[in-house]
Amino acid sequence: MNWNQMKLRLKIGSAMPKSEGNFSFGLLCGLFISIVLWISIIGWIMLIFK
């Protein structure tokens, strides 16, 4: 592997915006799932102590 190929790999490896986008998308999905989970937990508690 010569120097130009190594530089190209480093340039490809340091492309961060896609991973940042995936991180924010994962955070949004996690927040949505946790909201649904909390609503279901509150619903179960209200059903038990009716």
Image: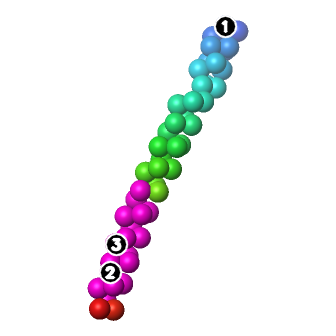
Secondary structure at badge 2 equals helix
Could you tell me how far apart the alpha carbons at marks 2 and 1 are, in whole angstroms? 61 Å
SS assignment for the magenta stretch, majority = helix
Q: Position of residue 4 (x, y in %)?
A: 67, 7
Crowding around mark 2 (Cα neighbors within 10 Å: few <14, some 14 to 19, many 20+) is few
Q: Position of residue 43 (x, y in %)?
A: 33, 78
Disc 3 to disc 2: CB gap under 8 Å: yes
Crowding around mark 3 (Cα neighbors within 10 Å: few <14, some 14 to 19, many 20+) is few
Q: Which residue is mark 2?
A: 44
Q: Which residue is mark 1?
A: 4
Secondary structure at badge 3 equals helix
Q: Amino acid at mark 1?
A: Asn
Which image quadrant: the N terminus? top right
The answer to whether residue 1 is visible is no
Of 13 and 46, which appears nearest the observer? 46
Secondary structure at badge 1 equals helix
Could you tell me how far apart the alpha carbons at marks 3 and 2 are, in whole angstroms? 6 Å
Residues in magenta?
Answer: 32-48
